[in-house]
Image (cartoon, rainbow, N blue to C red):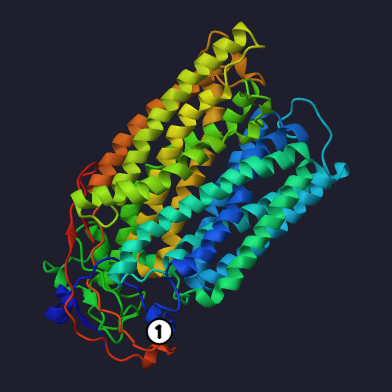
Amino acid sequence: MGHLRGSASMEESENSVLGDEETIKKDYKPLSCLSSNNERGGFRAASFMYVLVSLENMAFIAMMTSLYLYFNHELHFNIAGAANTLTNFLGATFILSMVGGFVSDTYITRFHTVLLFGLVEVLALVLMTIQARYKSLKPEDCGNKSSCMEGGIAVLFYTSLCLLALGSGGVRGALPALGADQFDQNDPKEAKALATYFNWLLLCTTCGATVGVTVIAWVSTDRGWWAGFLTCTLVTLAGFVVLAIGKSSFRIQVFGDSPMITVAQVIVVAIKNRKLTLPENADELYETSEKESLIVGQRIPHTNQFRCLDKAAIVPKAFEPSGWTVCTVTQVEEVKILTRMLPIIASTILMNTCMAQLQTVSVQQGFRMDRFIGKFEVPAISIPVIPLVFMSILIPIYEFLFVPFARKITKHPAGITQLQRVGIGLVLSIISMTIAGLVEVKRKNASLKNPLKPISVFWLSLQYGIFGIADMFTLVGLLEFFYKEAPASMKSLSTSFTWISLSFGYFLSSAFVDIINAVTKRLAPSKQGWLHGQNIDTNNLNLFYYFLAILSGLNFLIYLLSASWYKYKTEDSVPEPKFSEPKKMDVDDLPPPPKEESTDKDSTVELITGSKEKE
């Protein structure tokens, strides 16, 4: 049977290792059991994912930036309807990443999850291509209505959008964690490479997206929307084929028990025991033995935050331990980790709302600006290439120059902590939105003075470039933060939190447009909202940008409090067994883990948040 936490050996409770440990649940196998590091994993395996990320984002981001015009010009949505439909679609896509994360943690491997949802994504693109190809499958112009969709045309349209959201979201929920699995956190060299992996993942995203918003955008506007969608379909399919070819190179983590069951058990048992008194010594809380524990590769030591949840680990008088009568300290701490992450997620939502506005409204701004470079006219839907180019240039500079320089000062493997990286991104987003308001004032004044002499579209590069840098810091920081801090049985689900922040940002963007219009319509002397009508020269987009900048400033103060309050995860772990010869075996066949001393390496960095991270 189990034993109290206090009876664990002193040696084991004092051990700690650099980075996260692989979890070996009842259905889990350590990566070293599946293959040797020389044969599988590492950047060789990650290269297949980089190809998929490049090709899939080449198609997805090309569509993300062009669908607004497709909805508005081809399907006859009005400006508000097109913007809201696009942001709702993107919001649904990113929130459905939770489905991919949950499935890959619980039912099938991350590799097979990516392929399954990839099939759904390709099917959706085929349906969209068919509808764009035939005029009979598109609605007639019905005037300035929010949507002209009805009947079978509407069914086909919304079915393809829903499938695309499900497929794209599911892939994003599992793919980053699948790539991170290729770097063994028990190996100091591979653990150090994890931050580099996420940086290159973002670089591949931006490089693919750059091609998408230029080449595929040109195909869509010059050769027809159906041709652009067909190109997206073929490119996406090619990416998943490449991933399937690379299967033999991957370390594939086997799925385990549902992480949501663990969360539910802790909450239910804590509520049942709410009237019980917590022991003065936390060592009296329940923890199973190494052999009986569902998690034999990792233990998370007790923390004093959220003490109410500790009641789930109070040993019952009728000692019959089960998941619904008593939980282990490790299970309780897993739920605490997820709870501590919630304020971080919430404080990054507004930045993604700002990004959603730049992605949609700036295309409309581009139509009213001088888009010529000599005799070449830049397509309006290619304007988002500006931040992508900035990011593609700056990511290698960050990796090869900034990280080594910062590492010498902070002694942190990644140069700065993940939360500090996110904080820098939030500050830059405030600056970007302020500049966006100033640029819009200049554009609007020039357009009203002489519509035939608009300012250059490259004025938008100021706000876009800064926001691109902000996104570089924030997106990678969040992905690495959620992957490293998550319990090992919840890696995919936790990584999906990054996309949840994006999702809520897009949904909030749609709500902001409606709310701001409704409120300012009542308060403005003209009785018209800031974002009314089809003509952006007659509305007050600049005031909307200033409003978002002020909110972002307040949001940053909340983030500082949340990040300062957050306590990074520490672990008491049993080292994984190592094998000289690569071979497959069951968990039951594993030899007992050797006792070996591990070194503590503390990296304390307080540049922004004041938080301390133990690596």
Rendering coords of residue 581 (x, y %):
38, 89
Residue most toward the right? 136
* Position of residue 578 in the picture relative to residue 181 (left or right): left
Asked whether 107 or 131 is in front, the reply is: 131
Q: Please tell me how crowded label 1 is: few (under 14), some (14-19), or many (20+) other residues with Cα within 10 Å.
A: many
- In which quadrant of the rendered view does residue 294 lie? bottom left
Residue occupying image coordinates x 58% and y 29%: 361
- Taking the image as drawn, is residue 272 in sight? no
Residue most toward the top? 449
Residue occupying image coordinates x 17% and y 66%: 278
* Position of residue 176 in the picture relative to residue 297 (left or right): right
Rendering coords of residue 52 (x, y %):
57, 60
Residue occupying image coordinates x 51% and y 23%: 459
Rendering coords of residue 59 (x, y %):
64, 50
Name the quarter where the C terminus is drawn: bottom left
- Taking the image as drawn, is residue 455 in sight? yes
Residue most toward the front? 374
Residue 132 position (above or below residue 170): above
Residue 601 position (above or below residue 525): below
Rendering coords of residue 229 (x, y %):
73, 48
Asked whether 39 or 6 is in front, the reply is: 39
| Residue placed under numbered mark 1 in the picture | 33
Name the quarter where the N terminus is drawn: bottom left
Give the residue type at disc 1.
Cys
